[in-house]
Image (spheres, rainbow, N blue to C red):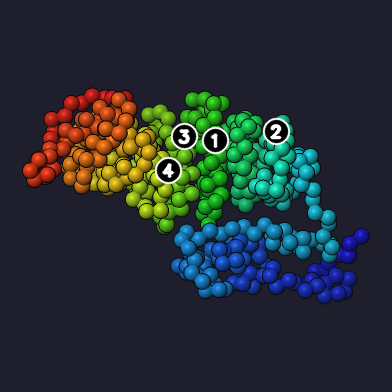
Amino acid sequence: MGRRREKGGRVDGLEVKLPSFFRCPISLEVMRSPVSLCTGVTYDRDSIQRWLDSGHRTCPATRLPLPSPVHLVPNHTLRRLIHLWSTPHLLPPPPPSSSPDDLLLDLRSPSSDPLPLLDRLSAFFSSPATDDSEKGRLASSVHFAPALVSLVVDDNAGLETLRVAVRVLALVLGMESRRELAIAALLADLDGSVSALLKVLKSGDGAEDYRIDAATVIESILSSPSCDSERRILIVEKPDLFPELVRLIDPPDTMDPAAADAGLRCLLAAAKGRHARAGMARAGAVPALARALTAAELPATTAERALKAMEAAARSAEGRAAVCEAAEACVGAVMERVLKVGREGREAAVAVLWAACVAAEDRRAREAVAGARGGAAKILVVMQGGCSPAAARMAGELLRVFKVDATSCSVGYDTKTTHIMPY
C-alpha cells in the first residue's frame, strides 16, 4: 500500500517538499489551471489573465513581448502532475491505459471528475502517434458518442470540462467517415447540445481555441444531411448564435485568422433561408465582415468566405439595408478584395454591390461604387473572366452605375438602371 500524505505536506512524519514548478510565478500559489505562453513559461490561468487584462503585453517572467492575440495553451501534463501530487498517495498509480477498449470503458463508467479522462481522449484523438484505425474503432462504437455527448449536456459540468469535451467532439467530427455517429448523438439532445456549445462559444479568458472548436461542432451539425429544417430553425433562432459568431470573426482586439475562418464557416452553414440571413444582419454581420475584409492578415480563402457571407446577408432586406447604411466601408472593402479571391468570391462581391446599387437602388451605395478607384475596370474583369450568366448580368447592370468619360476618365453615376433579379 502506498504511504499516505498528511496535511501540511508530510508523509508518515517526513517532510514532502512542494515542487517549485507547481507554483505560479505570479501568485506563488499551487496552480489550479496551468496554461503556457509562447515564451514557454507556465502560469495559473487566473493570474496571467489578470496580468493581460491590466494591459500588459509581455511575459511576466521573461519580459519578452507577446504576440497579439495572446494564446493561453492549457498545460495538461503539468495539471495531471499537480493532481497526482495532491492525491493522498505518495506514489502515483500506474498511468491509465489509452487503448480504445479501456477508454470506452472509462467513458461509460460514472466519475465525479471526468476531466482527466477527457484529457486522455483529447490526447488520443489528436496525437499523430495514435493509429487511425484505433481512432476509428473507438469513434465508431455505438456507445462512444452518446457517452461523450452526455458529458457535454451535463448541467453540472464545469466550464473547463465542457471545453475539453467539445474539443474531443471537434476532433471526432474531423474524421469524415465517423462524424455521422457523433452528429446523431448531438441531434438526440439538440437543444442541450447547442446550449452547451454556445456556452463555450461565449467564453473568454484566452479560450480562442476552444471557441473555434465550438464553432466547428455547430457548423458540422448545420452541414449534416440529418439536420432538417426544423432542427436548423432551432439552432439559428438561438439569440446568442449570430452575435457570438460575429464576435469570433471581428473581435474587439486583434483578429485571429483561424478563429475568423471557423466563424465564417459556421456563419455560412447557418445562412440558409431568409430568417437566418436577416438574423445575421441584425447581429451586425455586415459591418463586421467589411472590417474583416480590410484586415491584412486575412488569407484569400477566408476573405472569399467573408464575401460569400456578405452576399448571403445581402439577400435579405435587413442585409441590404446594412450594406447601404455602411456603404462607403462595405463598398471599399469589397472593391479592395474583389480581384484577390477566386471565382466564387468575385461573383459574391458583384452580387453584394448589385444588391445595394440595383436591387435596393440606394444612392449612397451608388455613389460609393461610382467613386471607387478602378471600380469599373474591376467589374469588367469579373464580367469577362468566365463568370456565371447571373453574375455577368449583375456586372452588366453595375456598369451602368459608372459613366466613364473617355477623355478625362472621370467617373460619375447613372440612376437609369434596369431592375432585374438574376437570382
Q: Residue placed at 56% from the left, 63% from the top?
A: 38
Disc 4/disc 2 C-alpha distance (Å):
32 Å
Q: Residue placed at 72% from the left, 51% from the top?
A: 116
* Of the two numbered discs 2 and 3 in the rendering, the one whose residue sits closer to the viewer: 2
State left or right for residue 113 relative to residue 280.
right
State left or right for residue 106 relative to residue 211.
right
- The residue wearing badge 2 is 140
Q: Is residue 156 visible?
A: no
Residue 269 badge: 3
State left or right for residue 389 relative to residue 5.
left
Residue 177 placement (x, y as % from top left): 63, 32
Quadrant location of residue 268?
Answer: top left
Disc 1 residue type? Ser
Disc 4 residue type? Thr
Disc 3/disc 1 C-alpha distance (Å):
8 Å
Q: Are marks 4 and 3 in contact (CB under 8 Å)?
A: no
Task: Find numbered disc 4 in the image and state the secondary structure of the residue it sits on.
Answer: helix
Residue 209 placement (x, y as % from top left): 55, 51
Q: Earlier in the sequence, mark 3 or mark 1?
A: 1
Residue 385 placement (x, y as % from top left): 30, 33
Task: Name the quarter where the C terminus is drawn.
Answer: top left
State left or right for residue 250 relative to residue 202.
left
- The residue wearing badge 4 is 301
Q: Earlier in the sequence, mark 4 or mark 3?
A: 3
Dot 1 surroundings within 10 Å: few (below 14), some, or many (20 or more)?
many
Question: As displayed, is residue 172 above or below residue 275?
Answer: below
Dot 3 surroundings within 10 Å: few (below 14), some, or many (20 or more)?
some
- The residue wearing badge 1 is 220
Q: Earlier in the sequence, mark 1 or mark 4?
A: 1
Q: Are marks 2 and 3 in contact (CB under 8 Å)?
A: no
Q: Residue placed at 37% from the left, 49% from the top?
A: 292
Question: As displayed, is residue 231 above or below residue 25?
Answer: above
